Amino acid sequence: MKQPASQEWLPEIERYRGDLDRDLGAVARNRLAERITGGLSRPSKMPEAAWGLPASRCNVGSTLMQVKGSVCAACYATSGRYNFQRVQRKLEQRYEGLAHPLWVPAMVLLIRWHVGRYFRWFDSGDLAAGNHLFNICEVARHTPDIRHWLPTREYEIVKSLGVPRPENLTIRVSANMVDSPPPAWSPQTSMVITKEPPAGTHICPAPEQGNVCGSCRACWDRDVDNVAYYLH
Ligand code: SF4
């Protein structure tokens, strides 16, 4: 079931410029990090943890949901378990937490504690604002041993980042329409296909291996220019 676009309330997100070591101590107490961020999730497909927002809060995606043939018209994050009330409540808690001044140290603490090597942003949802991407870059900088993969359709937010991307953060800008090529301006991209993708594209092997990543880490790999997922 598709959800309506819901942008009535936007969190006011400030860029984090605090003292990380001091703030890590604060968010470690009384499960504050979990309360700010809503905690991490464990999608069955992924090798490790992820974090996302409600699909109904997507900016570009909420418009695309109404467009026939778009990737978001078939969004998996608007159906199945994502419709459970407790899941929706958790996702909404995450959205509200974006405005918390300790969001960066809270995410750093949870990732350092729970993630070994590979972390995925946005198993549902998308970037909320430019300062949200800035703060994610801060999280990546403070977790240098972790590879971060961030898929997004928020082209303008990515283009206007204004600071260098951390080496361990792969931002994969995604094509909006099924079978259409991804934006040429982004070095790492992804697309959804029903037919043969462009030459050189890495086709996601998950459907052939129990719908899990297994040993594949192409989405995190900056040397893989374009990843294609078959529409399901
Ligand atoms: S391309 Fe590889 S890393 Fe990406 S989702 Fe598919 S299996 Fe996982």
Image (spheres, rainbow, N blue to C red):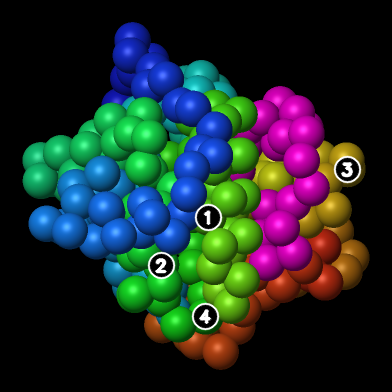
Mark closest to the chain's N terminus, 3 or 4: 4
Q: Residues within 10 Å of mark 4 (few under 14, many from 20)?
A: some
Kind of residue at badge 1: Val
Alpha-carbon span between mark 4 and mark 2? 10 Å
Alpha-carbon span between mark 3 and mark 4? 29 Å
Q: Are marks 4 and 2 in contact (CB under 8 Å)?
A: no
Which labelled disc corresponds to residue 139? 1
Residue located at (61% from left, 50% from top):
137
What secondary structure is marked by label 3? loop
Q: Is residue 53 above or below residue 148?
A: above
Residue located at (45% from left, 26% from top):
13
Alpha-carbon span between mark 2 and mark 3? 31 Å
What residue is disc 2 on? 111
Which labelled disc corresponds to residue 184? 3
What secondary structure is marked by label 1? helix
Q: Position of residue 76 (x, y in %)?
A: 38, 48
Mark closest to the chain's N terminus, 4 or 2: 2
Q: Which residues are magenta?
A: 151-171
Residue located at (54% from left, 68% from top):
143
Mark closest to the chain's N terminus, 4 or 1: 4
